[in-house]
Image: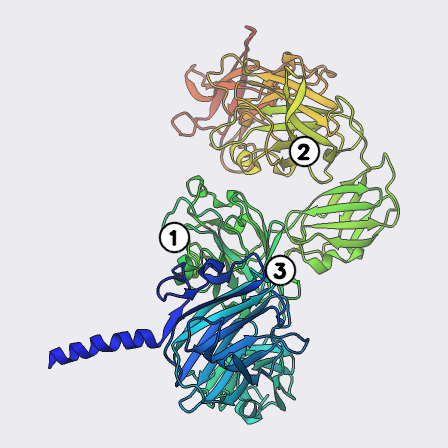
């Protein structure tokens, strides 16, 4: 019995193979699996498709064995990259008793197109010998273009009823083309294609996805999507062509929230799988609705299963969807696939379809495909290549054309816009936001701390703590409440011309308020501006157009109203800034005032500028560079600013490529006077040349520095800045420079140098105490003894010690401290042991010395008093 079963299977398999076939040419040839015969030399397999590949006009054919014609379904894909005619058309032989399709035969074929503007249809023929009979002309003129891509389906039942379908886009949305009865020929041996062509079209025929086999039952229609067209209309998109009678029954559709059945249900004449519903009751904006659909049938009579879906008549608001996580450097791999991506977060309580929205990265704009992001849900955007590797991480969408390096490692601007072009969200990220050097090298994402803190940048982002390197599609590993409570400041103003001013704020501001010209006023009778244009996308700047020109040699004050608020609603704090028409700098107007060329660990090099002139200078016109002493030319040029930046008389400005690092290592620096460059000129830890010049390479100041300019008794000058003793001293004179004092942390970035010494004033060295009688009892009155000093010149080092009446040392206040030219030490009455000193008279002993060998010793008396 088992043997009989085995024999039956072995005999049956060859019948199946010879009776039906499938060929998508994925094996790269047409000579096997299945083998085709005919004009082999005139066809190739190109990119997984069968393609005609001739050089001259002619006729070419291929055929393969096929013995099925009763209860059969034929499917195939055709591309003709030309407009078909009698001289240029394709035939697909569904049945033939001969392999050679160029001669007499008995069979059936479909021809795509003939000569004539209305003849670009499907034509179905019966051929007997050399005679052909037209049996059916298709209903649609579906091949009238110059690049026609069709998917065709033919079905014949057991008695000879033929039905023809086609999708003019090459997809699977088959539209009826016609039907006919013919049962003259009931057998076949071959299936094949035949091309008739002129020389110009000899390589423009393509075929693919052949299937000949049993009739496959179609699934009932399903709703693919609901599209809101207007406040009163919807498009219901089915996955199949639907029957007109059932699709237009209004009772088959129902919407909740009092909307009810549609007034009209009509099929779209251009898209027979789409039904448009028109309602009397309008939909509320950004409100979730549910729709029930049932009873709709396909053209072959199959009825859909009841459907319950939702839709929203949606109009975007700013920050409905925000950037929430950025993987800009996925290598080296930590635990996630080596592909870059960005994650979005839906801050609303409704689902949002992002189809037609755009993502801008840098200057490139890409359109987002259909992708729904649920309330408080996530959507990861990535490349088409990365989609298979990231698909199981949740809601993922591949953006067509998005390159693998779209998200710049160092940082760039990302902007999300809705389908109308309105900005929804943005982020200008930087790799400095990681706040973790080890993670910033790659494999880790940047995560947003609080997705509802919409506008803050670095303060609301940092490296992921997820052990995989990121958290795509789920809650961020560092998520926490982090509201923006910082009040914004008006930082500065730039002057583009005498009637155009640019204001810069410390953070993004409320856009509509920035447009209100009444919220700005300028003194000296300049009044209010006549126009105000916020700068997209952060809105941390606004361009003002003035009603009258600014006058030279006047420094104006501009005031903004305290009604201005930032993106989070915080009111403005500092609301004034200066304006002036800038002049052109000449040599020595702006000087290099301080240089840190050997930064401390975790720090950054900097160069400080000082405006010693009587006019305002626009730093847009200047550059910082190094200098080639052989060619006498500027090298490693860095423009100070790509926008107007006014440096007023007596102002300092610190230039660095990392303001955060300078702030961290010099906590007393004036950060409001820090300006970050994209990079610093070439500077070494030992020596170099720093040049300030105009954009026309006119040198304004040049400093040749070397480490020998520091105090010689420094064992290590790492982290010690060189300060100019006075702005009027010559840059080229090494005696004009001195190491910054240890009392100020070895640098004074953004403010007056610790070694400043006026060459125009006579200053006598002196020390004095205040108060001479002090009582450290916590009363707030004379609790601390201050030892003030003022020196004739910089470079002194101090030892300061306190002795009691018996000559015993009680406290060491300073030991080998490099002094500035003026300053103070303080004693709170404590001893070296941390105890409170006894009431009595104390000697303050100050020893001063410098590298020139000068030594001074001072002894002063003080009284530590108290309550008895």
Instruction: Please say if the residues under marks 2 and 3 sit with CB atoms less than 8 Å apart.
Output: no
Name which quarter of the figure residue 267 lies in.
bottom right
Residue 199 vs 637, above or below: the answer is: below
Pick the front one: 326 or 575? 326
User: Circle 3 sits on which residue?
Assistant: 200
Mark 2 or 3, closer to the camera: 3
Q: Residues within 10 Å of mark 1 (few under 14, many from 20)?
A: many
Q: Earlier in the sequence, mark 2 or mark 3?
A: 3
User: Circle 2 sits on which residue?
Assistant: 640
- The numbered dot on residue 336 is 1
- The numbered dot on residue 448 is none
Q: What x and y, as percent, mark residue 365?
A: 61, 55
Q: Earlier in the sequence, mark 1 or mark 2?
A: 1
Judging from the image, what secondary structure is the residue with disc 3 in? Answer: helix
Q: Earlier in the sequence, mark 3 or mark 1?
A: 3
Q: What x and y, as percent, mark residue 612?
A: 74, 25
């Amino acid at each position: 019995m088992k043997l009989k079963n085995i024999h039956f299977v072995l005999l049956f398999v060859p019948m199946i193979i010879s009776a039906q076939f499938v060929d998508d040419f994925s094996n790269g040839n047409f000579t096997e699996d299945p083998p085709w015969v005919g004009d082999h030399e005139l066809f190739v397999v190109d990119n997984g498709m069968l393609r005609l590949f001739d050089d001259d006009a002619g006729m070419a054919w291929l055929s393969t064995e096929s013995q099925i014609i009763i209860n059969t379904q034929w499917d195939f894909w055709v591309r003709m990259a030309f407009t078909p005619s009698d001289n240029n058309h394709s035939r697909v032989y569904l049945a033939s008793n001969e392999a050679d399709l160029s001669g007499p035969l008995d069979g059936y074929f479909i021809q795509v197109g003939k000569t004539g503007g209305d003849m670009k249809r499907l034509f179905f023929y019966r051929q007997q010998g050399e005679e052909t009979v037209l049996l059916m002309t298709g209903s649609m003129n579906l091949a009238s273009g110059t690049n026609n891509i069709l998917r065709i389906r033919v079905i014949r039942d057991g008695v000879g009823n033929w039905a023809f379908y086609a999708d003019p886009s090459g997809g699977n949305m088959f539209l009826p083309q016609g039907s006919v009865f013919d049962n003259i020929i009931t057998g076949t041996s071959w299936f094949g294609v035949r091309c008739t062509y002129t020389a110009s079209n000899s390589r423009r025929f393509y075929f693919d996805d052949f299937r000949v086999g049993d009739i496959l039952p179609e699934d009932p229609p399903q709703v693919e999507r609901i599209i809101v067209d207007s406040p009163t209309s919807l498009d219901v998109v089915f996955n199949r062509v639907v029957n007109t009678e059932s699709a237009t029954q209004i009772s088959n559709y129902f919407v909740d929230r009092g909307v009810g059945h549609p007034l009209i249900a009509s099929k779209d004449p251009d898209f027979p799988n789409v039904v448009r519903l028109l309602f009397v009751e309008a939909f509320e904006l950004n409100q979730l609705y549910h729709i029930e659909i049932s009873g709709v049938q396909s053209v072959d009579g199959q009825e859909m299963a009841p459907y319950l879906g939702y839709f929203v008549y949606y109009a975007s608001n700013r920050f409905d969807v925000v950037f929430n996580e950025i993987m800009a450097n996925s290598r080296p791999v930590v635990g996630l696939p080596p592909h870059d991506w960005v994650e979005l977060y839906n801050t609303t309580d409704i689902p949002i379809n992002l189809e037609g929205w755009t993502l801008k990265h840098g200057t490139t704009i890409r359109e987002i495909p259909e992708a729904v992001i649920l309330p408080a849900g996530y959507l990861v955007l990535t490349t088409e290549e990365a989609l298979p590797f990231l698909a199981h991480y949740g809601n993922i969408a591949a953006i067509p054309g998005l390159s693998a390096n779209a998200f710049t490692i160092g940082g760039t601007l990302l902007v999300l816009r809705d389908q109308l072009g309105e900005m929804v969200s943005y982020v200008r990220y930087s790799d400095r936001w990681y706040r973790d050097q080890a993670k910033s090298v790659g494999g880790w994402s940047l995560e947003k701390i609080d997705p509802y803190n919409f506008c803050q940048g670095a303060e609301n982002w940092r490296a992921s703590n997820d052990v995989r390197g990121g958290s795509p599609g789920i809650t961020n590993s560092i998520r926490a409440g982090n509201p923006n409570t910082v009040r914004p400041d008006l930082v500065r103003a730039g002057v583009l011309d005498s009637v155009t001013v640019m204001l810069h704020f410390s953070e993004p501001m409320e856009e509509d308020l920035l447009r209100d010209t009444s919220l700005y006023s300028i003194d000296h009778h300049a009044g209010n501006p006549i126009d105000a244009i916020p700068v997209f996308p952060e809105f941390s700047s606004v361009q003002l157009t003035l009603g009258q020109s600014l006058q030279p040699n006047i420094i104006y004050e501009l005031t903004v109203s305290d009604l201005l608020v930032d993106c989070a609603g915080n009111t403005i704090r500092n609301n004034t800034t200066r304006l002036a028409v800038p002049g052109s700098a000449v040599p020595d107007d702006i000087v290099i005032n301080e240089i840190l060329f050997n930064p401390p660990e975790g720090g950054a090099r900097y160069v400080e500028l000082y405006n010693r002139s009587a006019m305002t200078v626009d730093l847009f016109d200047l550059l910082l560079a190094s200098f080639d002493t052989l060619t006498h030319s500027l090298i490693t040029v860095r423009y100070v600013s790509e926008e107007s930046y006014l440096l007023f008389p007596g102002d300092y400005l610190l230039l660095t490529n990392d303001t955060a690092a300078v702030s961290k290592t010099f906590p007393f620096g004036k950060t409001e006077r820090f300006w970050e460059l994209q990079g610093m000129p070439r500077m070494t830890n030992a020596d170099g040349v720093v040049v300030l010049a105009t954009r026309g390479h006119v040198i304004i100041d040049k400093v040749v520095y070397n480490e020998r300019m520091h105090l010689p008794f420094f064992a290590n000058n790492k982290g010690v800045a060189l300060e100019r003793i006075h702005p009027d001293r010559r840059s080229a004179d090494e005696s004009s420079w001195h190491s910054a004092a240890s009392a100020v942390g070895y640098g004074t970035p953004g403010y007056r140098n610790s070694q400043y010494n006026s060459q125009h004033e006579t200053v006598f060295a002196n020390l004095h105490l205040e108060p001479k009688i002090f009582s450290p009892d916590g009363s707030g009155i004379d609790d601390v003894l201050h030892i003030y000093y003022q020196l004739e010149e910089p470079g002194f080092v101090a030892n300061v010690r306190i002795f009691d009446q018996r000559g015993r040392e009680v406290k060491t206040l300073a030991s080998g401290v490099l002094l500035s030219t003026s300053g103070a030490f303080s004693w709170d009455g404590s001893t070296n042991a941390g105890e409170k000193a006894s009431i009595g008279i104390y000697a303050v002993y100050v020893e001063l010395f410098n590298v020139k060998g000068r030594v001074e010793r001072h002894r002063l008396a003080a009284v530590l008093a108290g309550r008895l």
